[in-house]
Image: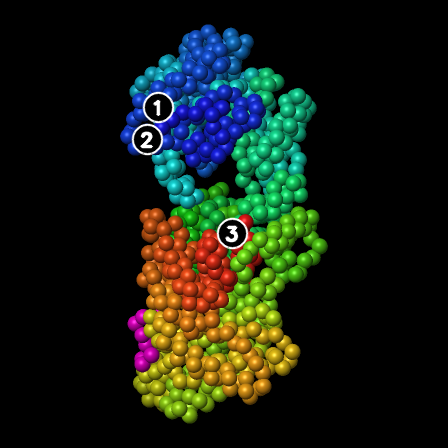
Amino acid sequence: AKFVYDFTEGNKDLKDLLGGKGANLAEMTNLGLPVPPGFTITTEACKTYLESGTEPAALRDEVTAHLDALEAQMGKKLGQADNPLLVSVRSGAKFSMPGMMDTVLNIGLSDKSVQGLAKQAGDERFAWDSYRRLIQMFGKTVLGVEGELFEDALEAAKAAKKVTVDTELEAADLKKLVTKFKKIVKTEAGRDFPQDPREQMDLAIHAVFDSWNTDRAKLYRRQERIPHDLGTAVNVCSMVFGNLGPDSGTGVAFTRDPASGHQGVYGDYLQNAQGEDVVAGIRNTVPLADLEKIDKKSYDQLMQIMETLENHYKDLCDIEFTIERGQLWMLQTRVGKRTAGAAFRIATQLVDQGLIDEAEALQRVNGAQLAQLMFPRFDEDTKVETVGRGIAASPGAAVGKAVFDSYTAVKWSRSGEKVILVRRETNPDDLDGMIAAEGILTSRGGKTSHAAVVARGMGKTCVCGAEELEVDTKRRRMTVPGGHVVEEGDLISIDGSSGKVYLGEVPVVPSPVVEYFEGRMHAGAQDADELVEAVHRIMAFADRKRRLRVRANADNAEDAMRARRFGAQGIGLCRTEHMFLGDRRELVERLILADTEAEREESLKELLPLQKQDFVELFSAMDGLPVTIRLLDPPLHEFLPDITELSVRVALAESRQEPHENELRLLQAVHRLHEQNPMLGLRGVRLGLVIPGLFTMQVRAIAEAAAERKSAKGDPRAEIMIPLVGTVQELEIVREEADQVVAEVEAATGTELKLAIGTMIELPRAALTAGQIAEAAEFFSFGTNDLTQTVWGFSRDDVEASFFTAYLEKGIFGVSPFETIDKDGVGSLVKLAAEAGRATRPDLKLGVCGEHGGDPESVHFFHEVGLDYVSCSPFRIPVARLEAGRAAS
Ligand code: PEP
Ligand code: MG
């Protein structure tokens, strides 16, 4: 394999091999932009080095050849005494890992060549300053010397001279400092600072390779979900100097504003400085626009280059540059990071400029960004102090009183208080508290910590790993930087989208994007208007492109209407069990407890009109659009009181010798219905087969509601769905009864109802026998929640809080299979069943109504396997529309 590429040999598409920085340096070189010559050592070389622990011989030879070529081009030799070539050695992985890895500048300086540099530059101070920087950087990153030792020596030199800034040290002072620095290296590293320039370079290259595996780099990758086996490339680049006087300098720039997308001049410039001075904040930068006054020629050239880069990359770029004595050099560019809002705005701006088309614009945004824009946020105009910052683990804005244990969280929230649960880290014992809290704040742990995983699963705001906060759960308090103490009960606010933590209550404002979807647009701030306009246009692009239809999971008219406003094209899942709660629970209880046929029929008769009314409301909210109603699914005991609570009640009554016949009957029923594994028990179609009259009552309610809507000139489009079917026989029996009831209602009302009857595919057996099941089903809707549960054998109610954290940390999966569809396992059953079903019945309608229907990655999968629609909760409908559009373009 080829281990080294000259900048003229690579291009921007070789990021896997050359890393982001190397690939883009090559791209700029080939665009004819002023890039200091150099070469890139590949990630393959890094991987080989890390595996074997030594540098492969072929790599050394290739580096020699490229160095020779570079020296020939520059007309000087690395570290040559009278006229030295100096190089920088910089890391550059495929994904940027800011501040994680190593860089060494000024390689090639030695006791001899420092004189040559002084002559070359005509500046002795500059040469000695460059040399001391090399020893400092090299000592710290390559030889592992404690950085503070150098900083202390530098401070001491300034103090001795009674000056405060580095630039006031003169050549002679810096010369002395170099001697001091070399002594530090000798004592601390047990070796001399290497005078051989090639040895300097080789050691620096190895140090960059090794920096891939430092603890902090590994931690960063775990948090950002960057694979550990990519390795880093190394860029060896001829040095240019921004610290050669007032006609030199260094800066960063964006081709447009990464916060708003507006075009203009955005960036910072620092005169007479090198890159690390900007980062270190030694002196204040000036706005990039000021460069026009300082050096008009370089400024104009930079503007020209920024335009070239934007037109070439067709996207926002960020740039690092250096000016050496009036000559502009490009040190880096890349497609720049941006906020979620700016992503939408930039995508539409680029369409308007004719740089990209609609399909490409859809690739520039994603559902996660849209979801982020839909969360309520803290009012940015409020002046409040940030007291800490952690990892943005689960988005949202939460305000509440700080509590430090789960018990208090539950107790306080029961009495109507809003609380934020603050813990060092959470574990399964904290679950009740997490459910009760508005948000969760931890001082330990990353994006896959228990708190983060569980909070995301619950859709609850979470900031984790806010390490500056000292959480003392015993004393129920936390100390924030600066020493302020937050006691139990003090108000705090946390922002799960930025990771920021605030003292006190920060006002929350609704998202302008949600206001727009809701059709409640007020003329707002210009910023919000531009954002909404961009979202509106991108959604139109997505709707034009997508093949998948998007429906909602909704159980009542209110949700249905919201879903419709958000763009739902029907209801894909109405869970009728949600209609049996509240005051109707008693009716259901009577149904379950009925001793005689007459009693049972009595309670069914009472339920019928209530159910019918539910459906009338739903059909009018969704008039003209399909509404899939699922017959009752959950285990019956869910409608009865808790077994322990009831036992206590019975025992108490007994001891007080009070009458308790009803309680006793209830208790017996609860015992009778109690199951060890209710999820695998008497639920779904099994209920319909075991409780006479239950499903037919529901079917009658649907049919009568549809007939009523028809006679009111409505357009009801009901679909009846049977849950938890495992074999076609179950479906056939239920279907026969249902068909009969529908026929009766049609005859009685004189209307033709055309009710479709279909089934959920949510058990492995159903998927495996889908060809047979399709004989009796007009549609399939994949219940990927239960399908995931049964394919993996994971209890959907327990695992996320118990062992998933361990699984995520061990990398068994990168994300919960209940969140993103497991393509290989659950997904292949979906695919198989879809194909078998369509083979039996070509016009079989196929959808999905598990949680995955609103998950971006899963939506792409459902598009690929050819489903007709996805169904998800109302709030996720815009995300599903967008991702369906992205999948199709
Ligand atoms: C499913 O199992 O995916 C489903 C949608 O049904 P429920 O979540 O109600 O079990
Ligand atoms: Mg289910």
Label 3 C-beta lies within 8 Å of the nearest ligand 1 atom: no
783 up-or-down from 497: above or below = below
* Residue 887 marker: 3
Q: Which residues are magenta?
A: 671-679
- Mark 2 → mark 1, Cα distance in angstroms: 10 Å
- Mark 3 → mark 1, Cα distance in angstroms: 42 Å
- Whole-percent x, y for residue 49 in the image: 32, 29
Q: Residues within 10 Å of mark 1 (few under 14, many from 20)?
A: many
Of the residues shown, which amino acid type is indicated by label 3?
Ala
* Residue 48 marker: 2
Of the residues shown, which amino acid type is indicated by label 2?
Thr
- Whole-percent x, y for residue 702 in the image: 52, 79
Q: Residues within 10 Å of mark 2 (few under 14, many from 20)?
A: some
Of residue 305 and residue 139, the one placed in the foreground of this image is 305
- Whole-percent x, y for residue 135 in the image: 41, 19
Tell me if label 2 and label 1 are in contact, CB under 8 Å.
yes
Residue on which disc 1 sits: 59
